[in-house]
Image (cartoon, rainbow, N blue to C red):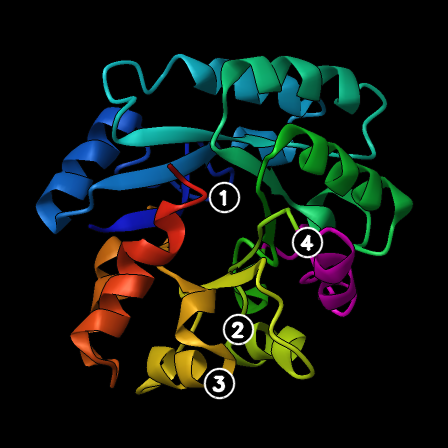
Amino acid sequence: MTIDCNVTLGGWPFRRLAHSTPADFVALMDRNEVDRARACPFEGIFYKSAYEANEDFRAKPAGFEDRLKQLVVVNPTYPLWEDELDEYIDWGPAGIRVYPSYHGYELADPAFERLLERATAADLLVQVAVRVQDERLHHHLAKVSPVDLSPIEGLAARFPTVPLIILNASNLEAARPFAHSTPANLFVDISHIEGIGGVGSLARSIGVKRVLFGSHAPFLYLESAFLKMLEADLSDVEKALIRGENAKGFFA
């Protein structure tokens, strides 16, 4: 089984993306033998109210609910976010995704800790997007710094029942939170892990059970994530863990 934990659909403001509708993306999943994916809308990053983007996206995977499950974008600095989260919980989302750099806060912000408290109570996982695009390619009037992950090891310890998934982290960024310990609820996706043997090196460094298959498609090529797995110096059992077994429990 392959579960892609890092998909974002809809409109990216700076260029047109192929396969950005649920129907087109499910067709892409079929061609690449991806069983399930977890997705949220790009509009959730840029709309003043992420609720509007989440609500618009909610109906779009109709007919593909068994393949494409919605994550909701939450901005914990927005005044009404907790009321909105109450409604999201009734939807039964796959989890929460946050974009701290785009929404103007840091992981040490009390607002993010409050979000983790709510996620604990609601039994929801939380994905933290370190970046959306390589900083070297940003529009010159829309430069956004990557998220500082320094607090995340401590947060994982303080909120041990919340699966915390780091998305779009570089090799060094992905390994750094595991330098002193290996929190059982902290995970990293492979979307921005680069270099020959990069995924294998990461798995050996932080533990194969902490690594998840995430493509950041369709912003990045879905096939790229599979090529990283193909050339990884890992056993078939280890590759199966990354491709889906590690995520199957909290994405059930």
Q: Earlier in the sequence, mark 1 or mark 2?
A: 1
Residue 67, horizontal then vertical, whole percent: 25, 31
Q: 1 or 21: which is nearer to us?
A: 1
Tell me how far mark 2 sits from mark 3, CA to CA: 14 Å
Alpha carbon distance from label 1 to label 2: 22 Å
Q: Which residue is mark 4?
A: 160
Q: Amino acid at mark 2?
A: Ser
Q: Magenta stretch: give its range.
A: 139-160
Question: Which residue corresponds to mark 1?
Answer: 14
Q: Residue at x 12, y 40 (%)?
A: 30
Q: Which mark is residue 170?
A: 2
- Read off the residue under disc 3: 205
Q: Residues within 10 Å of mark 3 (few under 14, many from 20)?
A: some
Q: Crowding at label 1, few (<14), some or many (≥20) Cα neighbours within 10 Å?
A: few
Q: Is residue 153 magenta?
A: yes
Image vertical order of residue 83 relative to residue 141, above or below: above
Residue lying at the far right in this picture: please name it: 110
Please indicate whether residue 6 sits to the left or right of residue 42 in the image: left
Q: Label 4 crowding class (10 Å Cα cut-off): few <14, some 14-19, many 20+?
A: some
Marks 1 and 3 sit apart, C-alpha to C-alpha, by: 35 Å
Q: Disc 4 residue type?
A: Pro
Amino acid type indicated by mark 3:
Ser
Please report contact status of discs 2 and 4: CB closer than 8 Å, yes or no.
Answer: no
State yes or no: discs 2 and 3 in contact (Cβ < 8 Å).
no
Q: Taking 35 as reference, is 155 left or right?
A: right
Mark 4 vs mark 1: which is more N-terminal?
1
Residue 244 position by quadrant: bottom left
Q: Nearer the viewer, mark 1 or mark 2?
A: 2
With respect to residue 197, does 3 lie above or below?
A: above
